[in-house]
Every structure is written in structure tokens, then in C-alpha cells.
Amino acid sequence: MTKQTVKFDPLDFFETKEDITDLLQDAFNSQDPKYIARAIGIAAKAKGMANIASQNNLNREQLYRSFSEKGNPTLSTIVAVLSSLGYKLNIKPL
């Protein structure tokens, strides 16, 4: 008997602003750059990557690549996408 698997899609779990906020806070608290980038990408997909790209005069395909598992987005891209999602970066002492 073989086991059936289904593809995991994180977008199925991030529908509300609170869900996305929790994801982003967890990612930033981890201080793992790859997790942070991936979480921002998931949030951007949940809100519509095409809309975010057009709001920031960015290329949609490049955004997908930047926030992919192997991506490495620039700080300016991170700030622009977070702003489009309704977030801003803050610094606080450890």
C-alpha cells in the first residue's frame, strides 16, 4: 500500500492580516534571513504579487525570484514590499 501525499501550500494558512502578522513576526524573531525573505514572499503572494509589483514599479517575476527559497532580496525591495503590505521595519534593542 502506497501513501498519498499532497503538496503543501502555505498560502492556505495565511488569509487574514493577523495570520500574516504572526508569520512575519515569527520570521523576524528567528533572525534567519532566508526565513524572513520566504515569509515576506508568502505574505506578498497572499496579498497579490502583481499588485505589489505594480505599486512599487517592480518586475513581478523578479519579486517571485527574490522571495523564493533561493532568493536574496535587497533591503530596498524588502522595505517596499513590507510597506505595500502595510508594515514597516522597526529597530529595538535586544
Image (cartoon, rainbow, N blue to C red):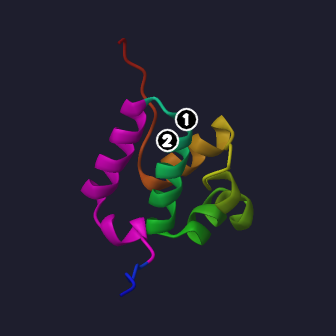
Residue with the mark numbered 1: 33
- As drawn, the label of residue 90 is none
- Rendered location of residue 44, percent (x, y): 50, 60
Callout 2 environment at 10 Å: few (<14), some (14 to 19), or many (20+)? many
- Rendered location of residue 70, percent (x, y): 67, 50
Examine the image and state in which quarter residue 24 appears.
Answer: top left
- Rendered location of residue 46, percent (x, y): 44, 67
- The image shows residue 22, relative to residue 33, as above or below, that is below
Residue 57 visible in rendering:
no
Give the residue drawn at x 37%, y 12%.
93
**Three-letter code for the amino acid on which mark 2 is drawn:** Ile
Residue with the mark numbered 2: 36
Looking at the rendered image, the quarter that the N terminus falls into is bottom left
Please give the range of residues in magenta.
Answer: 7-30
- Rendered location of residue 62, percent (x, y): 74, 59
**Residue that sits furthest to the bottom in the current view:** 1
- Magenta stretch: includes residue 82: no
- Mark 2 residue element: helix
**Three-letter code for the amino acid on which mark 1 is drawn:** Pro
**Residue that sits furthest to the front in the current view:** 1
Give the residue drawn at x 45%, y 29%.
31
In the shown orientation, is residue 93 left or right of residue 71?
left
The residues bearing labels 1 and 2 have C-alpha atoms spaced at a distance of 5 Å
Q: CB of mark 1 within 8 Å of CB of mark 2?
A: yes
- The image shows residue 42, relative to residue 7, as above or below, that is above
- Magenta stretch: includes residue 18: yes
Give the residue drawn at x 64%, y 63%.
53
Prevalent SS, magenta region = helix
Foreground: 78 or 5? 5
Callout 1 environment at 10 Å: few (<14), some (14 to 19), or many (20+)? few
